[in-house]
Amino acid sequence: MTEPARASKFFDDKQEKVAEILSRYPAEGRRSALMPLLWEVQRAERYVSEERMREIAEIVGTTATEVKGVMSFYSTFHEQPVGKFHVQVCSTLSCALAGADELYDFLVEELGIVNGETSADGRFSLQKVECVGSCGTAPVVQVNDTYYERVGRGRCQFLVDSLREDRQPPAWRERGGDTVGIDKPGPLAETAKGRADRGEG
Amino acid sequence: MTDQVADTKPAPIRSRHDPRYEVTMYRYVGVEGAHTLDFYRSHGGYAAARKAVTEMTPAQVIDEVKASGLRGRGGAGFPTGVKWSFMGPPDGKARYLVCNADESEPGSFKDRYILEDDPHQLIEGMIIAAYAMRVTYGFLYIRGEYYHGYERAVAAVKEARAAGLLGTGLFGTDFSFDITVHAGAGAYICGEETALMNSLEGLRANPRLKPPFPAAAGMYGRPTTINNVTSLTSAVHIINKGAAWFASMGTDDSKGTKLYQISGPVKRTGVYEMPMGATFRELIYDFAGGPTMEPKAFIPGGSSTPMFPWEDRFLDMAMDYGTLAKNSSMLGTGGVIVIPREKCIVNALYNLVRFYSHESCGKCTPCREGVGHWLPRIYQKLVSGQANPGDVDLLESVAGNIRGTAFCPLADACIMPVQASLKWFRDEYEYLAEHGKSKYPKADWWQA
């Protein structure tokens, strides 16, 4: 894993991106760019360092303390680097009724880390999160930005094994409910490719 | 062919579970490719926006939505047309429309599917709302976890802009409107409209004091209206098919269709579009195929709505605003969660209390201390078997003292389900306090 170059400024060579983000908001709303800028940094570096907070403060015209204050309010921004695969387990009621607690225990055993930790090799980090809006297809595991829905025991093992080999499967999307439309090829989850991607042959 | 709308009128789509029910908002969810502009336009998309902008005055659009009886689908159920009429006449300065897609209420997942599979429907709804209120600037605030939905929405806005459906001079008129898609970062409180505005302004998402209401001073101090995703998508079909069509479905105080969600141990979990006033029994048995484990309770509309025991009189209730209010609960987001007999109620409530404790923003004392610390500690004591019989009374007293005292609705959203669980299942609390172990100790819920 390459360490981000601390000395150089993150946004120096991204002035076009910065201008584009600022242009999304009206002139009186320059500070609205704060969260999108935090996302830019975090997607690239997996966390937001204090140096980056200072850079963002400069762009939106506030102090680094203010930026940290905003950042610490939200649970998806990290002040410490997370793993290459940031594994988030939803633990709220509907997922708990589908086994999220046992799923979490399984991941603790498999990955050798607990909630909030990152593995020594930097590959995995584990976080218990609150409802991510996948109650109908519980339990759900989110790896970085990708949802894996209806993660039973077998699928969970398959997911961990894939990540160990650096193969992050495409999202396991399910719909359920009233998903019959016109001339529809069938629910997304039931395609042969979908099953193969979940290790179900 | 900048803003050409295909004239193919699709045949009405009926629910496969009950042919009486027409599926409108949810018709293309799950269909491959439905998120693209080509698909949406070739299925009659943007006809409603064109009709509103080219054939109706803003006042007529508001009147149509008022006449339809549409009430806000985010949970509070405020009449949407009335909300739109609060904006007042334009004064030449900026005013804003915000779509609240910070769907975070446990048990709710309807907006995610719309964002991912049918984002153009939402954009069309935003154009109609913006035109009605003469707003030129729209924000679509999507919770940070919905990254796929965010990408889809950003792509859809780009497509719409390129096709002349967003930007200046829409549909050959002088009406202009554009949308900025904004990602949140994991905070339940942002579902509260004033907290959402603070978040959008790049601040900590603490709620603001009301009044002033957003229609007077909202985003950047300017008039602002905040609507839920499915309130806006409902408007598309109201304009397309008329207020009378919408008002013909539902009950006296609740009109049209709604996206109900069901999770927990039932055969077919998911989202079902049903007319307002359909019963819980219809949703749970006819649509979702019935429970897969012996049930003992259900939460009617997302985690903050007070639960009901599994009794005929409650299962046969109509899922509308008035009926739920009469029964001391709320329709909320329409997210039904079925709780099986084997699930310890105290444990289930501990799960929810922990959620609200995590999401308490810290602004006011009753919520920060009460919901943030006291309640989860009492629950922790209970579920770890270290409570005394008096602790159930203590819990009741603490809950009663928090209720109605907090700055925003978050604390009550936690207290109401706690109180409902005490009302119906106090025996499970007492048993746990007395014996130090749960009446229902089942711990392995994970399936193969």
Image (spheres, rainbow, N blue to C red):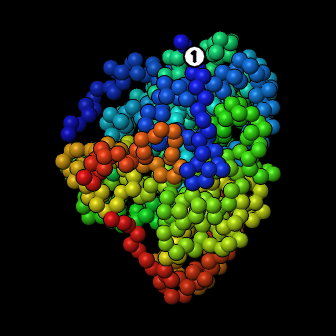
Q: Work out whether residue A33 or residue B337 is closer to the camera in this orientation and state it.
A: B337
Q: How many marks?
A: 1
Q: Residue at x 57, y 81 (%)?
A: B428
Q: Residue at x 38, y 67 (%)?
A: B446
In the rendered image, is residue B160 in sight? yes
Q: Work out whether residue B327 or residue B257 is closer to the camera in this orientation and state it.
A: B257
Q: Work out whether residue B342 or residue B98 is closer to the camera in this orientation and state it.
A: B342
Q: Residue at x 42, y 49 (%)?
A: A174
In the rendered image, is residue A60 in sight? no
Quadrant of the rendering where the C terminus of chain B is positioned: bottom left
**Residue position for label 1:** B4
Residue B198: image location, x then y, percent: 60, 38
On screen, B390 above or below B12? below
Residue B276: image location, x then y, percent: 70, 51
Q: Residue furthest bottom?
A: B435
Q: Work out whether residue B95 or residue B266 is closer to the camera in this orientation and state it.
A: B266
Residue B16: image location, x then y, percent: 55, 50
Q: Residue at x 37, y 33 (%)?
A: A41
Q: What chain letter is assigned to the residue under label 1?
A: B
Q: Secondary structure at mark 1?
A: loop
> Is B98 placed left or right of B57 in the picture?
left
> Is B250 placed left or right of B301 in the picture?
right
Residue B104: image location, x then y, percent: 54, 49
On screen, B190 above or below A9? below
Residue B429: which quarter of the image? bottom right
- At label 1, the amino acid type is Gln
User: Around disc 1, counting alpha carbons within 10 Å, would you say few (fewer than 14), some (14 to 19), or many (20 or more)?
Assistant: some
On screen, B239 above or below B287? above
